[in-house]
Amino acid sequence: MTKESSVQSVDRIFNIIEKIAGYRQGVGISELAREVGLPKSTVHRTVTALVANNYLSKDEATDKYKLGYRFIAIAGSYAAKLDLREVAGPYLRDMVVKLNVTGHIAVKQGDYAVYIEKILPHTYACTYSQIGKTIELYCSALGKSLLLGLQEKELIEYYRRLLPRKFTPNTLDIMGLQRELTEARKTLITRDNAEHEEGVYCIATPIFDSYGKVLGAISISSHEISLLTDENARAMILESAKMISRQYGKL
């Protein structure tokens, strides 16, 4: 391959990527070929190679292509603009409907978790939580997931500042919190065993970016204590978090 043809191939790849980036819902091969002015066979070969390397993804239901998670990992500036509520919302809503739970998204602000989204089912509502409201990190599933993003030194400093308030008989002390976080680092699941609000049980898991930094956390809540050990619910929230994190470049 000559130097000139190599440059043309690179130009073709970037032209295709730029066109696909303009289609939020994805684009098919025929339309893409028209857009870039190349034969369908050429576009198909290029797109197939990009999919194989996770730079593009294909929606099997529609045969349309859009940017893949590996490309987003490289394009850090693009990932930084992604709204966590917009990205995580569809996954959380799916769990709310299937499991009849309340869904939340939160981010860390100082020594608190801040609710940035709440999705309700038809038959259940968590009384405390509201968008924009804060909750302590040590006694909430969301807060504990956010604590998993701290380095050991930061966590020790948090423990030193912490003066746990006993919200319910189940609210953990510092030793109990330490034990739970140690286990959660293995499972990536944190829980709230009615530690902040009587009769409200939650599980949560963190959302990561391409550098492994915790961006936020998602949780599901129920009046049923069985949620804490529900393997189906745990699998669903972990898979949802994995798919959300991929969109931020977490491989």
Image (spheres, rainbow, N blue to C red):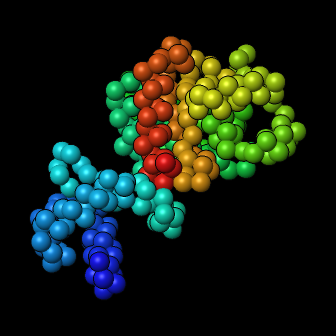
Q: Is residue 115 visible?
A: no
Residue occupying image coordinates x 24% and y 49% = 59
Q: Residue furthest bottom?
A: 4
Compare residues 43 and 77 and report the one nearer the observer.
43
Quarter that holds the N terminus? bottom left
Compared with residue 78, is residue 2 higher up or lower down, i.e. above or below?
A: below
Q: Is residue 53 left or right of residue 209?
A: left
Residue occupying image coordinates x 37% and y 55% = 53
Compare residues 160 and 26 and report the one nearer the observer.
26
Q: Quadrant of residue 173?
A: top right
Q: Is residue 133 left or right of residue 105?
A: right
Q: Position of residue 170 (x, y in %)?
A: 70, 17
Compared with residue 30, is residue 191 higher up or lower down, i.e. above or below?
A: above
**Count of numbered tags:** 0
Q: Position of residue 78 (x, y in %)?
A: 46, 66
Residue occupying image coordinates x 67% and y 25% = 183
Q: Is residue 24 visible?
A: yes
Compared with residue 180, is residue 107 higher up or lower down, i.e. above or below?
A: below
Compare residues 63 and 170 and report the one nearer the observer.
63
Q: Position of residue 109 (x, y in %)?
A: 68, 50
Q: Is residue 71 left or right of residue 141?
A: left
Q: Is residue 132 left or right of residue 47?
A: right
Q: Residue furthest front?
A: 1
Q: Quadrant of residue 120?
A: top left
Compare residues 47 and 120 and report the one nearer the observer.
47
Residue occupying image coordinates x 54% and y 54% = 210
Q: Position of residue 20 (x, y in %)?
A: 27, 66
